[in-house]
């Protein structure tokens, strides 16, 4: 997994060439005991040059960010936009803003 991880106030600008929904198992501690929890994950595949190193995708685990992003990605022509993701706060209470910006010439 290549989780998108930003600091509080951190911003990233991403172009997306394709995307898919899936799940991942994470290891947590509940009531002092280790537990495996399955979470929904949005994987966004990026064109070469968007990210400085492989793999050319990010996995998004934030349910609030997924709720904003999936409807935008489900629209025809989603790849003609750049998506600006900004994190506000720290886990587990972090929230995200998402802005869709048309690419030049799109």
Image (cartoon, rainbow, N blue to C red):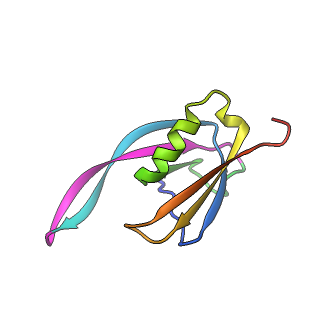
**Residue 87 figure quarter:** bottom right
The relative height of residue 83 versus residue 72 in the rendered view (above or below) is below
The relative height of residue 17 versus residue 66 in the rendered view (above or below) is above
Q: Is residue 70 magenta?
A: no
Give the percent coordinates (x, y) of residue 19.
54, 37
Residue 1 seen in the figure: no
Give the percent coordinates (x, y) of residue 9.
58, 71
Q: Nearer the viewer, residue 37 or 76?
A: 76
Horizontal side, residue 6 vs residue 52: left or right: left
User: Which residue is found at the position 45% from the left and 71% from the top?
Assistant: 90
**Residue 16 figure quarter:** top right
User: Which residue is found at the position 26% from the left and 60% from the top?
Assistant: 27
The relative height of residue 6 versus residue 97 in the rendered view (above or below) is below
User: Which residue is found at the position 41% from the left and 46% from the top?
Assistant: 41
Which quarter of the image is occupied by the C terminus? Answer: top right
Segment tinted magenta in the rendering: 31-48
User: Which residue is found at the position 65% from the left and 34% from the top?
Assistant: 78
Give the percent coordinates (x, y) of residue 70.
51, 39
Q: Is residue 42 magenta?
A: yes
Horizontal side, residue 25 vs residue 2: left or right: left
Identify the residue at the far top of this view.
76
Give the percent coordinates (x, y) of residue 104.
84, 42
Horizontal side, residue 58 vs residue 12: left or right: left
Horizontal side, residue 10 vs residue 2: left or right: right
């Amino acid at each position: 997994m290549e989780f998108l991880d930003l600091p509080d106030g951190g911003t990233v600008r991403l172009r997306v060439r394709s995307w898919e929904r899936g799940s991942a198992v994470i290891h947590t501690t509940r009531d002092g005991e280790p537990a495996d929890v399955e979470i929904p994950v949005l994987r966004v595949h990026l064109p070469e040059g968007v990210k400085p190193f492989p793999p050319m995708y990010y996995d998004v685990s934030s349910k609030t960010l997924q709720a904003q992003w999936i409807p935008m990605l489900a629209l025809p022509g989603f790849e003609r936009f750049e998506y600006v993701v900004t994190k506000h706060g720290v886990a587990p209470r972090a929230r995200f803003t998402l802005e869709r910006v048309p690419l030049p010439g799109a």
